[in-house]
Each structure stands twice: as structure tokens, then as C-alpha cells.
Image: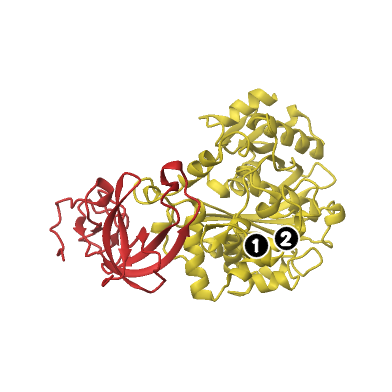
Amino acid sequence: MQPEMTADQRAGSWVDGDRAIVYQRCGVCENIWYFHRAFCPNCGDGDPGTFTASGNGCVYATSMVHRAPSDALRRHAPYLIVMVDADEGFRLMAHGDPSLAIGDRVRARFIEFGGKIIPRFGKPDG
Amino acid sequence: MSWISGVGLTPFGKHAGRSALDLMSEAASAALEDAGLERNDIDGLICGYATTMPHLMLSTVFAEHFGLRPRYAHAIQLGGATGFAMAMAAHLVAESRAARHILVVAGENRLTGQSRDNAIQTLAQVGHPDYEVPLGATIPAYYGLVASRYMHEHGVSERDLAQLAVLMRAHAQTHPGAQFRSPIDVDAVLASRPIASPLKLLDCCPVSDGGAAFVISRESVSGHGVRIRGAAQAHTHQHVSAAPSLTEFGAGMSCADALHSANVRLEDIDYAAIYDSFTITLTILLEEIGLAPRGQAGALAAAGHFSSSGKLPLNTHGGLLSYGHCGVGGAMAHLVEAHLQLTRRGGDRQAGAPSMALLHGDGGVLSSHVSMVLEAV
């Protein structure tokens, strides 16, 4: 398991093609968030830390998508979209194994979907 | 203070070959006629947007096309909340005396003007371009996520949600302009094609062509003016991933502020016009606003509480779910119907004699909220 990385070093995120989930924390007000920014959206501090998450969390919401938005994704349907409360204190959207339900403990792995690397959660022992 | 002096609404559904400007013009003409005003009476113009006709300056494009030379004009973009946001802005413009008669208009050929995939992909852009859209999430998926959590916390079943689709369809049967008028029951909703669980086809509003307009005036000029008593907004997030909660949104705050500004209590409301893009949207809004106890919106609908003859008539034209959803004009149809009900011009659909209406719209994924209180005078 990857420990927290040091601040000031942008950890690679799945959004940029890496196999990791990345979040940010403000050293001043301790706010924690997911969408990358150069500042804290709570207090405005200009030097937030960027960290790699453990990938562990708990399922908060689920939706099985039957109607994909494009031809390219149609062959993947149905696929489960989940929202996960990460152990580090932020919430993210990702894919999940079809059997997941609200409240399940989960761990992230990474898959290719529509030509991109995306996180997909499953049960830790799955 | 301001007045809604006239309203106009086209049928929703397929208007093949007609552009956004065509549909806007038709609705605008109807609203002017209803208000008893001419083009040169209009000195303010507020437009929405049309996904089939993206433009930097839609209000002046429309002004030129329709033949207006307003002293005040702009467009507004706030997703599903746009219609009521336009009405609120016109109310404020009238109160500020920047204009005397403000035409508020929107229309779009959203159904026939583009492919179904295009419509779905355009709408999905309310999701985050880096963190959400690449996952293949769609608007129904965002609302499906919300639904799963809300149902989990408040004991709402798919059958409860279906009751609201059945109610909207029952109302649409009485309106000749509605897109879907054939009767449905709860089993039909439950058996409809899965879209994004727990939402099925009949839990989702359709994509429509249509237009809507109204004139908001500084003083009452027609025999059927309705007074705008108060309005308020609340904006809590844009993306569902960044929502503070998926079981509490800004609707409660927005409505409480609108009621406060109107000096009206929720108990005084006797007509409701509530945004219903999905059955879960309507459920959450009714329950968060306080028009139904948590988890009880479906049961109240089944018991006739929200029917034309019930205690609180709701979306008596059929709502987005059955009258249809042409984009900005979708929620404006709720206001048009509220106006007709408050002025007792509902014809076969007239729901008693309501005197105070609460309107609520949301944009994004329950992100942007606009509430208004209208009064029959």
C-alpha cells in the first residue's frame, strides 16, 4: 500500500493516465478535496498538498448504467458507476464491480475504459 | 413588486423542421397576445439558451429576428434552473425600473434538431470533464446515484418513485399540448426499460421540441395578472462528486428564503410547480421543501394529495415527465400552468381556486436552485 506522498510533488492521477487516485489537503485549514486545484477552495491558501490515496473506502451510492452515452461505450454497458467515500476523507466517482452495494468496504484497482485508465472498485478480497 | 402579465406555451413533442428561433417566436407571440401588448411595448428581453443553437448573444439574435429593440437584454444559462432564474431576473429588473415590460422566452428543437446520442452527450457535460464524464456517466446516472443514496436513507422504493410518473401522466392526459398522454400505471413504470438504476425509462423525462414565454411587467396591465411575491436562489455545488450531501440539497434553503421574502408560510401554498426531470428529482424536492414528509411523496401522490382535486395540486399540465422537456422552456411550462391555474383559466384542468403558488426549479444535479412565490390578485 502506498503511503501518503510529500506535498509539493504532484502525484500522478488516473485523470492524467496514471494508476492512482489523488487528492489534496490544505496545510492551513485542513480542508480535504478531490478535484485538483492550485489553491484551497475553503480558505484560499495557495500551497495545498497533493497526496496519493490508499484506494480504500466505502460505497456511498451506486447506479448501473444501461444506456451508454456513445457508440464507443455501448459495448461496455451495463456498467456500474459508484461513489466511494475514501478513507482519507473525500468522495469520488468511479466504476465498481456489479455486485457492490451501498455500505460495502472496497479497494480500487484500475481498468481501461473508452481508451482511458479509470478506477474500478471491488471488495478488498475480491 | 412585479407582475406576470401574459404567458405563452407551445405544445411539446416533435416540431420537425422548426428551429429554436421559430419555437421562441411562436411562444413569444402567444405571450404578447395574452398580455395584450405589442412588440414596441417590450423594452426588456431575457432569453435562455438552446443546445441546438449555441450562440454568444442569443438575446439580441432573438430581438433582431422577432423585431424587438429592448433597452435591456441578456441570456441566462443555469441548466434546468434557467427558466425560473430568468423569471427572477426579470422580476428584479422590473423592480429596479430598468425596464417596464420584460419578455422572457426560450425554445429549442432539442428532439428533432440533433441525434439522440448528441443530446445525451451534450447534457452529460454538466458532469466534470476530467473526473466524471470519462467514466461514461450520463445525466440519468448522476440522478441514479442520488436516487440510490436517497432511497437507502429514507426508505423510498422504486414503486414510490413510480407513483409520481403515474401522477404526471394522469395530469398530461388533460392537456392537449402534452407530449405523452396515454395512461400508465405503476407496473408499467416498473417494467419500463432500465436506463441507469434505479431509474427506468418512465422515471425519466423525455427530450422534446417546444417553446415557452411570459411577460413580466412593473405594473399590472392585463385582466389576469399574477403577482411575483418573492424569489430566492441557492447554489451548493456543480458536480455530483462535489455535492456536500446526496440526501440534502439547497432546495430547502432556497424555498425558505423565497417564502420569507414573500412573507408567506409554506402552509399558505395551495398550488405547487416543482421541477421533475426524474421521479427522484420530484421526490427529493417535494420532501426537502417540506411539501411531503421524508419518504412519503409517492404515498401522498397515490392518495390523490397532489391531484387536481387534491389538497395541493402539483404540475397539473403533466410536468417534464409527461408534458415534456425542451430544455429551458421545460420548467417555464410549469410557470405558465401555475399562471393559468392562479387566474382560473385552467379549463378542464382547473384545480379549484388556488391563490398562492410555490415554484421550484433545479439545475445540474440538484446543484442550482431557484424558488418563487406567485400570488393571484
- The hue in which chain A appears in the rendered picture of the protein: red
Is residue B220 at least partly visible in the picture?
yes
Looking at the image, residue B141 sits to the left or right of residue B280; the answer is: left
Q: Earlier in the sequence, mark 1 or mark 2?
A: 2
Q: Position of residue B242 (x, y in %)?
A: 39, 58
Answer whether labels 1 and 2 touch (C-beta < 8 Å): yes
Task: Quadrant for residue B58, please give it.
Answer: top right
Q: Kindly identify the residue that appears in the image at 55 percent across and 60 percent down.
A: B199
Is residue B265 at least partly visible in the picture?
no
Numbered badge on residue B184? 2
Per the model, the C-alpha gap separating discs 1 and 2 is 7 Å
Return the chain for callout 1.
Answer: B
As drawn, the chain in yellow is B
Q: Position of residue B45 (x, y in %)?
A: 64, 34
Q: How many marks?
A: 2
Numbered badge on residue B189? 1
Return the chain for callout 2.
Answer: B
